[in-house]
Image (tube, grey):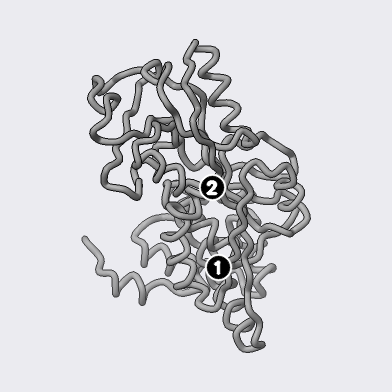
């Protein structure tokens, strides 16, 4: 029988969710009762009420002294209960900070495309949960101090491309952003077959990123391995400037697909060769040995949700 949203909302209370988490964590109703200060029968009743509200059995109860274990439905309920308590703690922290007149600050290291294309949607979600939060974005493209800044607390989070593993940070892969060719719609390259290779850049005028960026070095090394010799006519460290130079017909460019898809000038188009020059993995970085503030954790959740992570 299908249940209404209202019946679920009125049938589930925090005591049942707390009992679910405690029984799962301690392995028995008796231990959960001791932890929460209830009788064992009260804990059993709270779990039973939750099971009735959800229409599912949450625990396998072998009897005797054997530990109880979560059913598959119970595992799903347990994860959501944990998240619900996390949200409640975030709610309390946000309200208390507001009452104290404190302003919560989240500091995020970014690359340009991340700041322009990835963060706005996540920041809207964050603003709904933390209306008084201040987010400071710092451009950290290829800055060797990034890991140290995360570990020391100068940054709370960072969005990176091809970040190398380091035991001081946790890398959460968000998506692959492969190299594509940005060009004008009326260019000779745009008229090439839809699955043209990167070899079409051989001998072509190219607008490139600054040579101090490691990822540009990786790209040019890939060109050399393939015998591709573009003629670099301009270099820049500004995404908008690069797109404007291509739109002006001064050269083509290799950029990530996300930047190409959101190109600022209608005269621009992009080609996606089937071959991979070099990987471009966008990852979210957390400090591994430092607890995140609730607002930073909320922003992390919003970013990961965009990519189903």
Q: Choose between 168 and 143: the one closer to the eye.
A: 143
Which residue shows up at 65% across the image and 65% down it? 293
Q: Nearer the viewer, mark 1 or mark 2?
A: 1
Lower position in the chain sequence, tag 1 or tag 2 = 2
Which residue shows up at 36% across the image and 77% down it? 10
State the residue position of label 1: 85
Q: Position of residue 230 (x, y in %)?
A: 47, 21
The answer to whether residue 135 is above or below residue 258 is below
Image quadrant in which you'd find residue 166: top right
Which residue shows up at 58% across the image and 43% down it? 160
The answer to whether residue 296 is above or below residue 222 is below
Which residue shows up at 40% across the image and 32% down it? 251
Query: How crowded is the residue under tag 1: few (<14 C-alpha within 10 Å), some, or many (20+)?
Result: some
Q: Choose between 181 and 1: the one closer to the eye.
A: 181
Q: Is residue 59 visible?
A: no
State the residue position of label 2: 62
Q: Position of residue 106 (x, y in %)?
A: 62, 65
Q: How many marks?
A: 2
- Secondary structure category for the residue under label 1: helix
In the rendered structure, the answer to whether residue 183 lies left or right of residue 96 reads left
Q: Position of residue 57 (x, y in %)?
A: 41, 55
- Secondary structure category for the residue under label 2: loop
In the rendered structure, the answer to whether residue 36 lies left or right of residue 228 reads right
- Asked if labels 2 and 1 touch by Cβ distance under 8 angstroms, the answer is no
């Amino acid at each position: 029988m299908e249940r209404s949203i209202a019946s679920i909302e009125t049938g589930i209370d925090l005591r049942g969710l707390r009992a679910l988490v405690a029984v799962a964590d301690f392995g028995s109703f008796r231990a959960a009762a001791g932890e929460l200060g209830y009788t064992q029968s009260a804990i059993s009743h709270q779990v039973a009420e939750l099971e009735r509200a959800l229409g599912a059995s949450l625990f396998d109860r072998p009897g005797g002294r054997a530990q109880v274990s979560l059913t598959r439905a119970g595992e799903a309920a347990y994860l959501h209960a944990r998240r619900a308590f996390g949200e409640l703690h975030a709610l309390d922290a946000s309200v208390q900070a507001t009452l104290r007149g404190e302003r919560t600050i989240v500091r995020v290291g970014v690359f340009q495309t991340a700041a322009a294309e990835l963060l706005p949607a996540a920041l809207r979600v964050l603003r709904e949960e933390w209306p008084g939060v201040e987010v400071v974005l710092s451009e950290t493209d290829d800055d060797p101090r990034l890991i140290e800044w995360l570990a020391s607390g100068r940054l709370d989070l960072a969005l990176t491309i091809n970040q190398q593993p380091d035991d001081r940070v946790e890398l959460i892969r968000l998506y692959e952003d492969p190299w594509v060719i940005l060009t004008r719609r009326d260019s000779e390259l745009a008229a090439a077959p839809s699955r043209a290779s990167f070899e079409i850049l051989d001998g072509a005028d190219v607008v490139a990123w600054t040579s101090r960026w490691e990822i540009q070095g990786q790209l040019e090394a890939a060109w050399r391995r393939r015998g591709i010799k573009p003629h670099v006519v301009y270099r820049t460290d500004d995404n908008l400037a690069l797109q404007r130079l291509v739109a002006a017909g001064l050269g083509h460019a290799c950029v990530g697909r996300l930047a190409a898809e959101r190109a600022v000038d209608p005269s621009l188009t992009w080609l996606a060769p089937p071959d991979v020059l070099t990987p471009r993995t966008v990852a979210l970085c957390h400090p591994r040995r430092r607890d995140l503030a609730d607002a930073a954790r909320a922003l992390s959740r919003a970013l990961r949700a965009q990519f189903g992570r």
